[in-house]
Image (tube, rainbow, N blue to C red):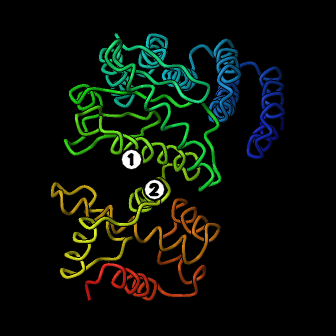
Amino acid sequence: YCNNAGLRAAEKKEFAEARRLIEEAVQLHPAGADLRANYCRVAVREASILQSLGKTEQSLSLLHDTLGRCPANPDVHLALGETYYKMNDYPSSLERFEFAAGILPGDTSIAARIAQIRKESAVERTFGENDRSRFVIRFEAGAGSDLSWKISGVLDDAYREIGNKLQWWPKARMTVIVYSKDQYKAVTGSPDWSAGRYDGKLRICASDLVLTNDYLRTVVRHEFTHALIHELYGTGIPIWLNEGLAQYAASDAPLSADEKAILRKAGKEGIVPPWDLAPLFTSTNAQDIARAYLESRHFTGYLFQRYGAHTAGTFIADCAGGKDPGEVMPTMFNMSPELMFGQWLDELAKEIGFR
């Protein structure tokens, strides 16, 4: 009874009560390994939420307390490893992951995580830090100090402007890492055209192109927006909406002449619905990638401008929750996907003149 009541409390995010009830169940039945596992599961979930709210010390305290109760539970070690990783404490992170690997020696995902953290640790071993209230900016010691301050200014503006646009501000401090081109590729494995990436940390490739002020601002704002999108919608958001929203929120600049030319060419060849763009984002053809980004950007902007931020945000949330756009559009917009596509295409054609 105590165990089941505790799990129900956890479902309602009443974590303190959930842990109290499951702890009572453990005291009543000390040999119940499943009860201890449930306690750990609830604590790990609570710690993750605390971490997302920027309450890192509380998260760490809870996980260490739980580890004292269940020292051989791999999930607690993994949660601690991820927490230390987010704090950029690579030695402590590796210690926890390696302990978990000892408990689960055949788990290839843990082995891959260890390999990635070791790679990042090796690249960043000489990095310095610009430690701000909202951001921690890591950079090559000596070489990247001036650039880190430029990025800090861009981030402060982005925090205010993009936060206001999406009505969302990061709850936890964000780590921003500035790499040379070779370091960036070694850590991320990203293609040559990539200048930034957000994967829980915001990573900037300080190539010659990125070092120009306008481009630096574009890259930093775009990746910062991905961080907000991740907090708002999680990992289930389709790539076309993720990239479209990142571009729309990060910039109010109109389409350039070159961008219009790319879309004009796409219009003549046959534009596909934005929700069918996923294959183009992984293309090796630069024109296909540019076209995918521009189409998703324009359609996302169209949603916000025509239907308003609340409706557009609800549509994105539904799609991020796993619903197909074709399922959402008839109820939300009272039109079929084909009609929605046609109306957007008319607006795009008027703007860039491909009909």
**In the image: residue 153, left or right of residue 139:** right
Characterize the local packing of mark 2: few (<14), some (14-19) or many (20 or more) Cα atoms within 10 angstroms.
some
In percent of width and height, residue 106 lies at 35, 25
Q: Secondary structure at mark 2?
A: loop
The one of 130 and 35 positioned closer to us in this rendering: 130
Q: Secondary structure at mark 1?
A: helix
Tally of numbered tags: 2
Of the residues under marks 1 and 2, which one precedes in the sequence?
Answer: 1
Residue in view at x 38 percent, y 33 percent:
203
Q: Which residue is mark 1?
A: 218
**In the image: residue 296, left or right of residue 319:** left
Q: Which residue is mark 2?
A: 251
In percent of width and height, residue 160 lies at 60, 44
Q: Quadrant of the C terminus?
A: bottom left
Residue in view at x 26 percent, y 72 percent:
263
Find residue 118 and report its image quarter.
top left
Residue in view at x 39 percent, y 62 percent:
240
Find residue 79 and report its image quarter.
top right
In percent of width and height, residue 141 lies at 36, 12
